[in-house]
Image (tube, helix red, strand yellow):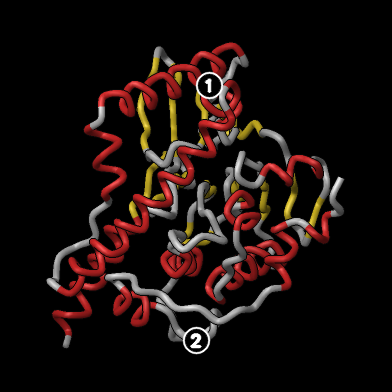
Amino acid sequence: MRPWSTTPLMRAFRSATPGSSNLPWQEALSANNPTHDDDPGAPRARRVRTVWISDVHLGTPGCQAHALLDFLKHVECDTLYLVGDIVDGWQLRRSWYWPQAHNDVIQKILRKARKGTRVIFIPGNHDEFGRKYLGHDFGGIEVAEEWLHTTADGRMLWITHGDLYDGVIQCARWLAYVGDSAYEFVLRLNRHLNSWRARMGLPYWSLSRYLKLKVKRAVSYVNDFEEALARETHKRGAQGVVCGHIHHAEMRDIGGVLYCNDGDWVESLTALVEHPDGRLEILDWAAELAQASKATTAAQ
């Protein structure tokens, strides 16, 4: 067993390699983010009861770390769930990639934990090394295999990454690795495409999300995954499930079970939040940043 100190996550904690970003909404990020988090002139944070984020994939070029930092700076919560694939151990084993922005995300989460936010990390398949440390607490971050969350209005939600209910991951792991490499290739194409779109003044557009929605087998895979989780949630006696894994943000009823997927921070830039009254909402941070970018442009 590898000691915790040599895992990708702990190497990440110690890393501080400078990096850069080519986000099409970079101007909005710069305008919204002061140098110091506690700057009295910073925009007032949005307050919610609970936040769920997953599939950040720190350690990959596709991770939109600057956008996630912006989200974490502007949204405060009592409990923050990290629903798996926060660090991409698969990619880091192939080649080390860790720009400063990825380090900043880790430090921001640790700072939230120090300031009183309860942070619960539920490992996924890309950061499965975390499953060796279930029940431990690292820097105020609790590590758990799964969780049951009770909303303010009394509903019980089962929290899991979701990979354990993915037939490809469980039955053909080699195919998952092949798919991961193909996905990285699509993301590289997507970055070049959106760099061109940004120069043309066009908004961000996700090629991989488009392919998922158009390819029949991909649509079938998503539906099978969602229904499998809904069935398992019903067996556990919970009213709903919150998961990640498939990079497809959604909130819908499946056979009387509330299915919530919080999306990802590679393509969709989404999070699930619970408001003080228990109401759940998917926040589309890409749309928020695009709106801020328009406002910045109009003010110039």
Residue 222: give its label: none
Q: Residues within 10 Å of mark 2 (few under 14, many from 20)?
A: few
The residue identified by callout 1 is 167
Q: Are marks 2 and 1 in contact (CB under 8 Å)?
A: no
Q: Amino acid at mark 1?
A: Gly
Residue 35: give its label: 2
Q: Amino acid at mark 2?
A: Thr
Q: Position of residue 157 (x, y in %)?
A: 56, 29
Above or below, comparing residue 26 to residue 36 in the picture: above
Q: Secondary structure at mark 1?
A: helix
Q: Residues within 10 Å of mark 1 (few under 14, many from 20)?
A: some
Quadrant location of the N terminus in the rendered image: top right
Above or below, comparing residue 93 to residue 217 in the picture: below
Quadrant location of the C terminus in the rendered image: bottom left
Q: Position of residue 182 (x, y in %)?
A: 41, 44
Mark with earlier residue (2, 1): 2
Kindly identify the residue that appears in the image at 36 percent across and 75 percent down: 29
Q: Is residue 96 left or right of residue 2?
A: left
268 or 2: nearer the viewer: 2
Location of residue 34 by image quarter: bottom left
Kindly identify the residue that appears in the image at 33 percent across and 70 percent down: 23
Q: Position of residue 187 (x, y in %)?
A: 36, 54
295 or 160: nearer the viewer: 160
Above or below, comparing residue 78 to residue 199 in the picture: above
Viewer can see residue 268: no
Q: CA distance from mark 2 to mark 1?
A: 45 Å
